[in-house]
Amino acid sequence: MRVQDLDTERGIIHVRQAKGRKDRYTLLSQTAYKLLEEYIQTERPREWLLPGGTDGRPITVRSIQHVFEKAKQHAGIQKPATVHTLRHSFATHLLEAGTDIRYIQELLGHASSKTTEIYTHVSIRDIRRIQSPLDRLKEMKDIE
């Protein structure tokens, strides 16, 4: 990702050659941007937002995986997780917050909605929020 891929005006990031070698736009969180802004002012990256060890090259996927593992250990997270887990979590949280699956499809860069539908797995928390129509009928009778 290049520094110019951050669009702070619209709150988006231009992701180039991401999963499936596709370009797409995704959300730029205000919280993340504040941290990035501080990082940019301190580190002054030139071309790449996260430069690698070799001049003119971005950080490697393996380096990102290593940083993720260290952060996971530091946070005391024992469950198995990968950087890709963050993508799944992002989609799942958006879905649970009521975001339309078509928007999630666009943010993830899926060509088919069928691919995005894997995130529609039902969580226990969501099931508990659903009220049975039978219970609603009983409540209506109790009101009368």
Image: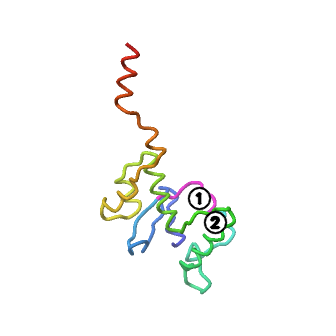
The outermost residue toward the bottom is 54
Q: Quadrant of the C terminus?
A: top left
> Splitting the image into 4 quarters, where does residue 73 fall?
bottom right
Q: Which mark is residue 103?
A: none
Residue to which mark 1 is pinned: 32
Image coords of residue 91 (percent x, y): 45, 57
Above or below 51: residue 132: above
Q: Amino acid at mark 1?
A: Ala
Q: Report if residue 34 lies within the magenta region.
A: yes
* The magenta segment: 27-36
**Camera-side residue: 107 or 81?**
81
**Residue 53 percent across, percent down from the top left:** 62, 84
Residue 106 covered by magenta stretch: no
Q: Is residue 140 left or right of residue 46?
A: left
Disc ID at residue 72: 2
Question: Sequence-wise, which precedes: disc 2 or disc 1?
Answer: 1
Question: What amino acid is labelled 2 in the image?
Answer: Lys
59 over 144 or under it: above or below: below
Discs 2/1, front: 2
Considering the whole magenta stretch, tell me its main secondary structure.
helix
> At x 59% / y 81%, what residue is drawn?
52
Residue 69 % position (x, y) = 62, 71
Label 1: which secondary element: helix
Q: Nearer the viewer, residue 33 or 126?
A: 126
Labelled pair 2, 1 in contact (Cβ < 8 Å): no
Residue 18 drawn at (x, y percent): 43, 72
Spatial CA distance of label 2 from label 1 is: 18 Å
| Residue 114 versus residue 50 in the image, above or below | above
Neighbour tally class for label 2: few under 14, some 14-19, many 20 plus, Cα within 10 Å:
some
